[in-house]
Image (tube, rainbow, N blue to C red):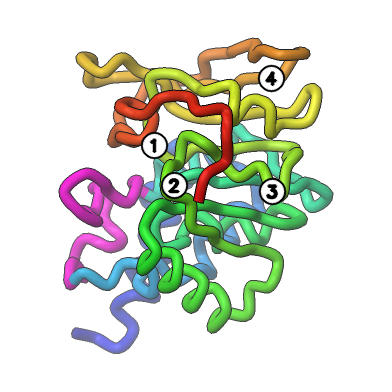
Amino acid sequence: MNKNYFEIARKNMVTNQILPVGVKNKTLIKSFEYVRRELFITSGNDDLIYTDSDVKFNNDRNFIRSFLLAKMFEQCNFTKDEKILVIGCLTGYSVAILSNLAGYVFAIENDKKTVELANKTLYELNLLNCSVHYKSRLNNGNSKNAPYDKIFIEGSVSNIPMSIVNQLKENGEIYTVIKNIDESIGFFVKGIRVKNGLSFTKIFNTNINNLSDFINGSDDNADKN
């Protein structure tokens, strides 16, 4: 493999996948140009890392297609004064991208080895404004560091539990894909916290993997390790 293979593939990803879907945020674009996705996907699928396909992580989870992740982040309008929670970050690629856009990025995953790998990679990249934490159930969020300006759920859910809504600041925003279990296509949505509820706006339709903790888990209204 050409020693510049990944660098060329990354540039092509931005030029041929991310820019054509309407991403215009210069900081976001530069982040996708800079962050080496191959450091976060080490399953041997080198040929797929920078393609427009999902990359399998395990039987239930995929890395979201980069152009789709960029299209979602474009809608979130992250700023340097914001504290963000990412739910379901896998090995931390999305966290690395967002570290260049936000003040501090907290993230959670439900597998200890994955959390260790994510933090190791982020540390080696000298990304000091982000961290990944282990939580046994993603649908409980991370109340320890709440409230957040924005929450990004990296996967599709059938509903958003109050245990997570309560971790948003008043008028804080949550972004995710909502779809029913028996449907293949859902809507990427923006939810604004208004008192004890969310006011939703549908942004665009798409399909990404379900997060099983949200589909099968109950709202325990607690943050359990």
Q: Between tags 2 and 4, which lies in front?
A: 2
- Say few, some or many: other residues with alpha carbon within 10 Å of mark 3 (under 14 / 14 to 19 / 20 or more): few
Q: How many angstroms separate mark 4 from mark 3 (CA)?
A: 21 Å
Q: CB of mark 1 within 8 Å of CB of mark 3?
A: no
* Residue at numbered disc 4: 192
Q: Between tags 1 and 3, which lies in front?
A: 3
Q: Which mark is residue 88?
A: 2
Residue 220 position within the rendered picture, expressed as x and y whole percent measured from the top left: 50, 28
Mark 2 falls on what kind of element? loop
Dividing the picture into quadrants, the one containing residue 200 is top right
- Say few, some or many: other residues with alpha carbon within 10 Å of mark 1 (under 14 / 14 to 19 / 20 or more): many
Mark 1 falls on what kind of element? strand
- Magenta stretch, main secondary structure, is loop
* Residue at numbered disc 3: 144
Disc 2 marks a residue whose amino acid type is Gly
Q: How many angstroms separate mark 2 from mark 4 (CA)?
A: 20 Å
Image quarter of the N terminus: bottom left
Upstream in sequence: badge 4 or badge 1: 1
Q: Residue at x 78, y 30 (%)?
A: 169
Q: CB of mark 2 within 8 Å of CB of mark 3?
A: no
In magenta segment, residue 17: no
Disc 4 marks a residue whose amino acid type is Ile
Q: CB of mark 1 within 8 Å of CB of mark 2?
A: yes
Q: Residue at x 48, y 76 (%)?
A: 121
**Does 143 sit left or right of 108 as displayed?**
right
Upstream in sequence: badge 1 or badge 2: 2
- Stretch of the chain drawn in magenta: 44-65
Disc 1 marks a residue whose amino acid type is Gly
**Does 50 sit left or right of 10 as displayed?**
left
Upstream in sequence: badge 1 or badge 3: 3
Q: Can residue 15 be seen in this view?
A: no
